[in-house]
Amino acid sequence: MKSLAELEAIRERAKADMAGRTEGGRKVVVGMATCGIAAGARSVMNVLVEEVRTRQLKDVAVTMTGCIGVCRLEPIVEIIEPNGERITYVKMDEAKARRVVVEHLVNGRVCQDLTIGAAEAED
């Protein structure tokens, strides 16, 4: 068992890490309701978390939410920029999630062909 001091140090490091990833940064929100999970959102979420961790993107927080409301386009990933702008990626899979991390989160280029606008134009 860890001492109380060791546990407090772990807690403080975790709080500092979380603050560093969310203050002024971007949020990546994955729809994890039943519809999203059935469509593969769990593996998409896992890839996003792993890629953000591996690339040490401290200004990015990966979180989950319930139903985003467009079940036919699941899995859905929404990126919320520090200025409040939202980019919604649809029909995601593991490869697309990796691409979004590299192109959008690392290099700042929105993957237009994966967005809800592109999907709606196809229909």
Image (cartoon, rainbow, N blue to C red):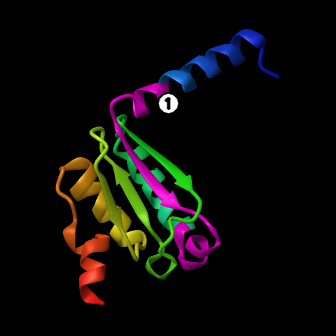
Q: Is residue 116 above or below residue 80?
A: below
Seen at 39% across and 28% down, the residue is 23
What x and y, as percent, mark residue 4? 77, 12
User: Whole-percent x and y of residue 51?
Assistant: 39, 52
Q: Which residue is mark 1?
A: 18
Q: Which of the two residues, 79 or 57, is positioned nearer the viewer here? A: 79
Which quadrant of the view contains residue 113? bottom left
Instruction: Please indicate whether residue 117 sits to the left or right of residue 29 in the image.
Output: left
Q: Is residue 27 above or below residue 123?
A: above
The percent coordinates of residue 55 (x first, y second) are 34, 45
User: Is 30 in the magenta?
Assistant: yes
Helix, strand, or loop for circle 1? Answer: helix
Question: Residue 120 occupies which quadrant of the picture?
Answer: bottom left
Looking at the image, residue 38 sits to the left or right of residue 75; the answer is: right
Residue at image coords 57%, 65%: 67
* Residue 56 picture location, percent across and down: 36, 39
| Residue at the spot 47% in from the left edge and 72% down from the top edge | 75
Which quadrant is the C terminus positioned in? bottom left
**Residue in the picture at 48% in, 65% down:** 44
Kindly indicate the quadrant of the structure image that contains residue 96: bottom left
Q: Nearer the viewer, residue 20 or 56?
A: 20
Farthest bottom residue in view: 123
Label 1 sits on what residue type? Answer: Met
Magenta span of residues: 17-41
In the rendered image, the vertical position of residue 7 relative to residue 63, given as above or below = above
